[in-house]
Image (cartoon, rainbow, N blue to C red):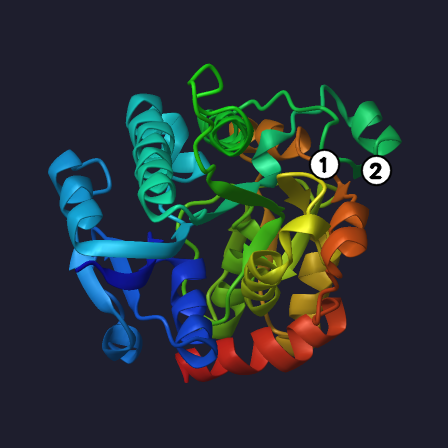
Amino acid sequence: MRKKAILITGAAGEIGHALIEALSKNGKTPLLTLDLEPLPEDIRDLTTHWEADILDQKLLDRLVSEYEFDAIYHLAALLSTRGEFSPSAAHQVNVNGTMGLLRLAAEQSEWRQKSVQFIFPSSIAVYGLPDLETKTQYARTREWEWNYPRTMYGANKLYCELLGIYFSEYYRQLAAEQPVMVDFRAIRFPGLISAFTVPSGGTSDYGPEMLHAAAKGEPYACFVRPDVRIPFMAMPDAVKALLDLAAAPAEAISQRVYNVTSFSLSAEEFKGWVLKSFPDAEVTHEPDLKRQTIVDSWAADMDDSAARRDWGWEPDYDVQRAFEEYLVPNITKRYQ
């Protein structure tokens, strides 16, 4: 008899750490986690963890035979900056890894005659605005606007959104009998900032890198111009968004992909918030033209009105609360 579980891939990453804590408190279904790395010590007892590669087909076959998944949170990904250095590896992990898990979810949805929920974190990287004038004009970008990503990571995420829509709406559409479809739901996140994990290679990480360097008393050379602007979100709100979307009744969901956001800051404004708490912080700007170009193509802010309308999305942390109650106290404690 298969064991019921919730599967979390990429569990050792920034979102995974917080999501495991939240799901272990909120639910009775056991957690099964996958990552190439071991879990941090403080969450190891909350889940059954496999140090494994999501591209391992034998592993996926074993999962199908041993477990019945109510939900899959697919967090594993090769991030934007790293993906530019190894686009083939990024495609393998981000696309082929997602495809394998969607096929697993489709197979399980059919035999259990009940949809497997597939929760997918997408990214602001799916946007590709052509110039700064357009970025100013489309200050709050909607889900269907400017989907012309400039990075392998963004292209991978956009394609995986389309794969999820296919498996939810059109899979085996020519078959004699319509199968039970996967319940795919995706969130496009802005730049995420965690107080408990260090930045790990994202192109939006100049914000959290600035904050962590200030807390350590180290100088930081920001790799974008002071005027560059993108939206950000504190990690607790990212986890809240995933859980809120997962909990939304199917009849409330009018689209498969949703923007969510919290606050939008320029790099200069972000530095201002850092200096409020760390007045002696040394922050300079040495733009990396290649990464700068990528960030310039991202939306200055994201229109999340659909998420607010359909499933009541609202962040708990505005910019002041994010810095004063979550980020600064916890990051300071980390380095004391």
Of the residues shown, which amino acid type is indicated by label 1? Ala
State the image coordinates of residue 236 (x, y, percent, origin top left).
57, 69
Circle number at residue 299: 1
Element type where label 2 sits in the image? loop
State the image coordinates of residue 117 (x, y, percent, origin top left).
47, 50
Front residue of this view, candidates 5 and 173:
173
Q: Classify 10 Å Cα crowding around label 2: few (below 14), some (14-19), many (20 and above).
A: some
Q: Which residue: 53% across, 68% down?
A: 214
Q: Is residue 222 left or right of residue 90?
A: right
Q: Which residue: 56% across, 22% down?
A: 150
Please identify the quarter of the rendering in which residue 140 is found. Answer: top right
State the image coordinates of residue 255 (x, y, percent, origin top left).
68, 39
Location of residue 92 with respect to 121 vertically, above or below: above
Q: Classify 10 Å Cα crowding around label 1: few (below 14), some (14-19), many (20 and above).
A: many
Q: Quadrant of the C terminus?
A: bottom left
Element type where label 1 sits in the image? loop
**Sequence-wise first label, 2 or 1:** 2
Q: Is residue 175 left or right of residue 254?
A: left
Location of residue 20 with respect to 92 vertically, above or below: below
Of the residues shown, which amino acid type is indicated by label 2? Ala
Q: Is residue 274 visible?
A: yes
Circle number at residue 171: none
Q: Is residue 207 visible?
A: no
Front residue of this view, candidates 8 and 292:
8
State the image coordinates of residue 232 (x, y, percent, origin top left).
66, 54
Please identify the quarter of the rendering in which residue 83 is found. Answer: top left
Q: CA distance from mark 2 to mark 1?
A: 7 Å
The residue pinned by badge 2 equals: 139
